């Protein structure tokens, strides 16, 4: 009896020591994660500040390059030399503008997002974007079409963040049709809003561009991944971040040579009566 009791005490002590050791490891792991999170937050603040510091002089650089271009055009420089110098300055302005775009996208991605959701008819967001984006499509020779339901589609969203996500997807589709060949002759960009279900509302941004290779789809939303010559690789990352902050998600369906459908799924809220009955 005494021997059995002693064995039980020893076994219990060993179990206790093992649990204590596991707890110590968990605490240390949590401390390391907290320290790493603090380090990453500090690094994010530092890089965002650095991006701001870089962005400001770029505007001055572009302005001075444009002034220099005008001076060259007004100068007595020979025709060939003048044209060569102007082309070089144009390239400088173009690449500087691309750097500004990269920095702006980075700042949007690195910045902390705190959505301010309010009940909204999602059709109004679509109307605003269509009016804003149509001139750019016309200039590119792309037909912008809408497919919106007759009835309101209400969701609790931060209008600014959802607009930014949709605009990034529209730009992505437009650029795809400008840089890649498609099997279809029509160049169309469609913004569609499905009627609301009990759980969610869906925006679709559909293009008739070259489509996306299946092996590229899993990496589309990674920062700095791009298949475009002058893309920043951050637009889709910003779009996904904005939608996920609403508890939603973005899905992609694409057929090589036929185009792509980017779907934004947002949780909806029921439309409350203006004067609810007592």
Image (cartoon, rainbow, N blue to C red):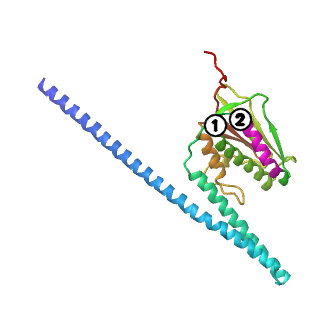
At 63% across and 40% down in the image, what residue appears? Answer: 158
Give the labeled residue for mark 2: 122
Tell me which residue sits at (60%, 56%) in the image: 106
Q: Earlier in the sequence, mark 2 or mark 1?
A: 2
Residue 157: numbered disc: 1
Position above or below: 100 against 216: below
> Could you tell me which secondary element the residue under label 2 belongs to?
helix
- Residue 169, image x, y percentages: 71, 46
- Over which residues does the magenta segment extend? 123-137
Q: Label 2 to label 1, Cα distance in Å?
A: 9 Å
Q: Nearer the viewer, residue 138 or 25?
A: 138
- Relative height, residue 33 to residue 179 (above, below): above
CB atoms of marks 2 and 1 within 8 Å: yes
151 versus 157 height, above or below: above
Where residue 28 appears, as percent x and y from the top left, is: 34, 46
Residue at (62% x, 44% y) in the render: 240
Residue 220: tell me if it is visible. no
């Amino acid at each position: 009896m005494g021997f059995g009791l002693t064995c039980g005490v020893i076994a219990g002590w060993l179990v206790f020591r093992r649990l204590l050791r596991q707890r110590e490891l968990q605490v240390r792991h949590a401390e390391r994660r907290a320290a790493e999170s603090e380090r990453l937050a500090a690094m994010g603040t530092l890089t965002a500040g650095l991006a701001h510091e870089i962005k400001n002089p770029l505007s001055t650089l572009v302005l001075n390059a444009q002034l220099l271009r005008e001076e060259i055009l007004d100068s007595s420089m020979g025709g060939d030399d003048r044209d060569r110098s102007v082309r070089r300055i144009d390239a400088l302005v173009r690449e500087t503008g691309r750097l500004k775009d990269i920095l702006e996208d980075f700042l949007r991605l690195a910045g902390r997002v705190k959505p301010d959701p309010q009940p909204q008819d999602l059709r109004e967001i679509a109307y605003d974007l269509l009016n804003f984006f149509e001139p750019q499509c016309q200039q590119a020779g792309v037909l912008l079409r809408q497919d919106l339901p007759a009835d309101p589609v209400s969701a609790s969203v931060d209008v600014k963040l959802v607009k930014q996500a949709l605009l990034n997807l529209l730009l992505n589709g437009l650029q795809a049709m400008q840089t890649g060949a498609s099997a279809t002759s029509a160049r169309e960009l469609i913004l569609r809003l499905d009627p609301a279900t009990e759980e969610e509302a869906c925006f679709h941004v559909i293009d008739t561009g070259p489509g996306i290779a299946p092996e590229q789809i899993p990496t589309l939303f990674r920062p700095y991944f791009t298949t475009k010559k002058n893309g920043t690789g951050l637009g889709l990352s910003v779009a996904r971040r904005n939608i996920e902050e609403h508890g939603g998600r973005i899905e992609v369906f694409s057929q090589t040579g036929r185009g792509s459908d980017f779907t934004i799924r947002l949780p909806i809220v029921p439309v409350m009566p203006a004067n609810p009955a007592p």
